[in-house]
Image (cartoon, rainbow, N blue to C red):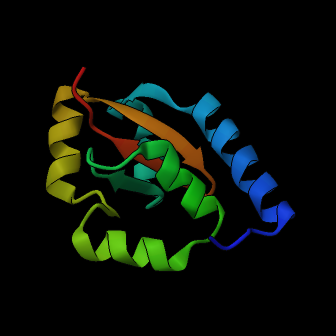
Amino acid sequence: MVDQPEGEEDKESLLRREYHGQTARIQWHDLQTYYARGSIVRVSGELDLVEVAVQLGLDNTAQFKGWIETGDVAAVPEIQALKWYESNQELWAVVAAPWVLVQLRDG
């Protein structure tokens, strides 16, 4: 096992705590301004929303490349945005500036 530099471990822990505390449910209508700016990122329900935010905050390019290639992290397609708008879908969201990560979860 490779030891992480102490500063990196502290940053990861801090980000995890911060994003966990900021994660909340939100209606799609409340996200329209961010969607119009292109700031919304859809996260698959198979992934942990907070973990995705943490990896974004750590600038883990390799991990994001993998998630993008599998489609687990992507822009919200226009057709999906329209469906969510029509139903004012409730989503889980966390802000990982400048992005707003959203996830549709059951329950």
Find residue 102 and report its image quarter: top left
Q: Is residue 52 left or right of residue 8?
A: left
Residue 1 in picture, x, y percent from top left:
62, 70
Residue 64 in picture, x, y percent from top left:
44, 71
Q: Foreground: 24 or 39?
A: 24
Identified at 68% across, 37% down, the residue is 17
Find residue 74 and report its image quarter: bottom left
Identified at 80% across, 53% down, the residue is 10
- Give the quadrant of the C terminus: top left
Q: Count up the numbered dots.
A: 0
Identified at 45% across, 49% down, the residue is 101
Which residue is the extreme one toward the top?
Answer: 107
Q: Is residue 16 left or right of residue 9?
A: left
Vertical comparison of 45 with 21: above or below: below
Residue 86 in picture, x, y percent from top left:
16, 32
Q: Is residue 40 left or right of residue 57?
A: left
Vertical comparison of 1 with 27: above or below: below
Residue 89 in picture, x, y percent from top left:
25, 29
Q: Foreground: 33 or 50?
A: 50
Q: Foreground: 40 or 55?
A: 55
Which residue is the extreme one toward the right?
Answer: 7
Which residue is the extreme one toward the front?
Answer: 1
